[in-house]
Image (spheres, rainbow, N blue to C red):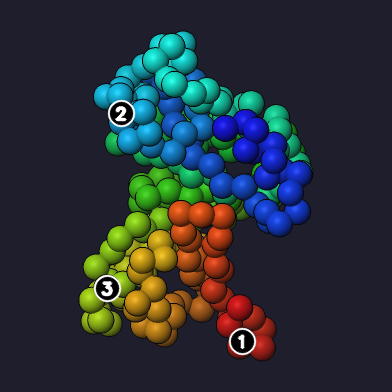
Amino acid sequence: TLPAIASAVEDEQYKFIEFDIMYTRDKEIVVHHDASLLRMQQKTYDIRNLTYEELREVSNYSIPLYREVMDIISDKKKMNIEIKSSGDFVLDGGLVDYVVADLGERGVLKNAMISSISSDVIKYVSEKYPEIKTGKIYWVTYSTFIPFDFLTEELYMEMNETGADYLMLHGSNIGNIDRIMGLKPADKTVVIWYFNNEIYIIQKDETDRLW
């Protein structure tokens, strides 16, 4: 919500702001985590199938536009912008292009990274906009639950193929953290995220100390 974004901008405990974006049917970019209203509102509407006006009419709460959120954040905080894939690479690529252009016009490109569950999205960003840091998100993955090196190696192979800078794993995957860190390429960073306001960045510094 816009009040949540405004509050996080003003609160010094928050180092950056993460939000998810997707298209409506009429190509308005909205900030919303779920692709539908089912989980939060028990309504069987997919956001991509509604115009923004239709979405405003059926939603129980206000779903903000990307530009409204960016007007609040401006250059005040760093951002992790997650691209919610529509399953249509042309649409996803267009969304990335718009956001990168907008960040450039606002002069805040250096303050943003782009993340996604979609390997295609991350590969597209890495190849077309190499100056932007990217994060490949995993909610649940076999390689972090089953203790076999080849599975973890495959995880990093997929990450390398996308060009991602960050491996972003939900906290449910940390049972295999020793193997994840032991096989991690030196130039990659591991991020552990939770469904709250906490995130942990795990990387070795110049003294070979983990932080």
Mark 3 falls on what kind of element?
A: loop
Disc sitting over residue 145 in the figure: 3
Q: Nearer the viewer, residue 136 or 63?
A: 63
* Residue drawn 33% across the image and 36% down it: 39
Crowd rating for badge 2 (residues with CA inside 10 Å; few <14, some 14–19, many 20+): few
The residue singled out by tag 2 in the image is 42
Q: Total marks drawn?
A: 3
Q: Nearer the viewer, mark 3 or mark 1?
A: 3
* Residue drawn 43% across the image and 11% down it: 57
Identity of the amino acid at label 1? Arg
The residues tagged by marks 1 and 2 sit, at their Cα atoms, a distance apart of 47 Å
Q: Are marks 1 and 2 in contact (CB under 8 Å)?
A: no
Q: Is residue 128 left or right of residue 172?
A: right
Regarding residue 26, the answer to whether it shows in the image is no
Crowd rating for badge 3 (residues with CA inside 10 Å; few <14, some 14–19, many 20+): some
- Classify residue 9 by image quadrant: top right
Q: Is residue 129 left or right of residue 146?
A: right
Which quadrant, please, contains the C terminus?
bottom right
The residue singled out by tag 1 in the image is 209
**Which badge, 1 or 2, is on the more N-terminal residue?**
2
Regarding residue 203, the answer to whether it shows in the image is yes
Whether 209 is drawn above or below 40: the answer is: below
Identity of the amino acid at label 3? Phe
Q: Nearer the viewer, residue 179 or 145?
A: 145
Q: Nearer the viewer, mark 1 or mark 2?
A: 2
Whether 30 is drawn above or below 34: the answer is: above
The residues tagged by marks 3 and 1 sit, at their Cα atoms, a distance apart of 25 Å
Mark 2 falls on what kind of element?
A: loop
Identity of the amino acid at label 2? Gln
Whether 175 is drawn above or below 55: the answer is: below
* Residue drawn 49% across the image and 69% down it: 190
